[in-house]
Amino acid sequence: MTGWQRTATQGTAQEFRPGDTLSRLYPEAAVGGFTRRDGFVDFYTRVNALLTPESDVLDFGAGRGQWAHDPMPATHLALRSFHERVRRVVGVDVDTAVISNPTLEDAQIVPAGSPIPYADETFDLVLADYVLEHVSEADAPGVAAEVLRVLKPGAWFAARTPNKWGMIGLGARAVPNHLHTRVLSRLQPGRKEEDVFPVEYHMNTRRHLARLFPQPNRLVVYGHSSEPTYMGSSVPAWRAAQLLDRLTPPRLASTLMVFVQKA
């Protein structure tokens, strides 16, 4: 297996161990449950640094809470379970599966392009983890405006999304949306069909983000290239992807980490 897998003992996240490919190429994963290139740890460490026990959080595009159901190292689980350490986490999504998300105090189904059903200046943080790539060109300005509307002054929008011009973004856009499920089932055998959605890529470049979240808001964007788990289980394919990452300029890194502080 490429990422994390369940051992013979069932139950907690501590019972998961690195898969064979990950262990071979990133042996440090055996120490603490994460690699030196772990984008999940990078992103959620910063998210947690922005939270306090009094924080109200909106999970934008929360879905069914995939992370709460799937195998996850203890380090990842501890970072992602911030709903246990803040005042409340609520969520919205276009998918009815959000109603079953076990980590949300409140869940709302919101059709694409519709207003977020919460009052102005409600939240201390809005989270969008691999969501922006699914927003259409027509809806992107409204999504940005709604995110800023529901944030308190000085609060943060935190997003992780593929870079339109990075390797993942280029590859995803080369595959027609109706074939995404079939392709991902080959590259990521554990990926469930209900967790695959059409991609748009209209909020996925620095230029897009600067236009959608203009000054005086503070925009911080940086590129990140994680372990190439999207390359299946082939060690040579992983090595080729690692080499390509090393040769790629930072602005073309596969993932964008996006942080916007509302003025």
Image (spheres, grey):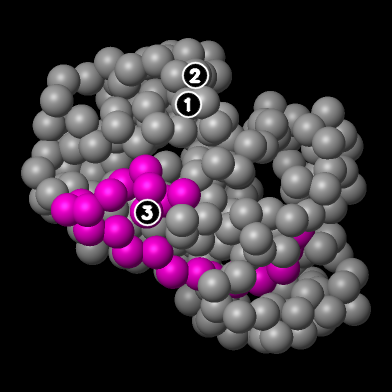
Q: Residue at x 75, y 79 (%)?
A: 244
Q: Of helix, strand and loop, which one carries label 1?
A: loop
Q: Residue at x 13, y 49 (%)?
A: 263
x then y, percent, for residue 162: 59, 54
For disc 2, the marked residue is 112
Span highlighted in magenta in the image = 208-230
Marks 2 and 3, the one that precedes in the sequence: 2
Q: Residue at x 73, y 42 (%)?
A: 191
Quadrant of the frame with the N terminus: bottom right
For discs 2 and 3, the disc positioned in front in the rendered view: 3
- Image quarter of residue 69: top right
The reply, left or right, for residue 103 in relation to residue 8 is left
Q: Are marks 1 and 2 in contact (CB under 8 Å)?
A: yes
For disc 3, the marked residue is 210
Q: Of helix, strand and loop, which one carries label 2?
A: loop
For disc 1, the marked residue is 139
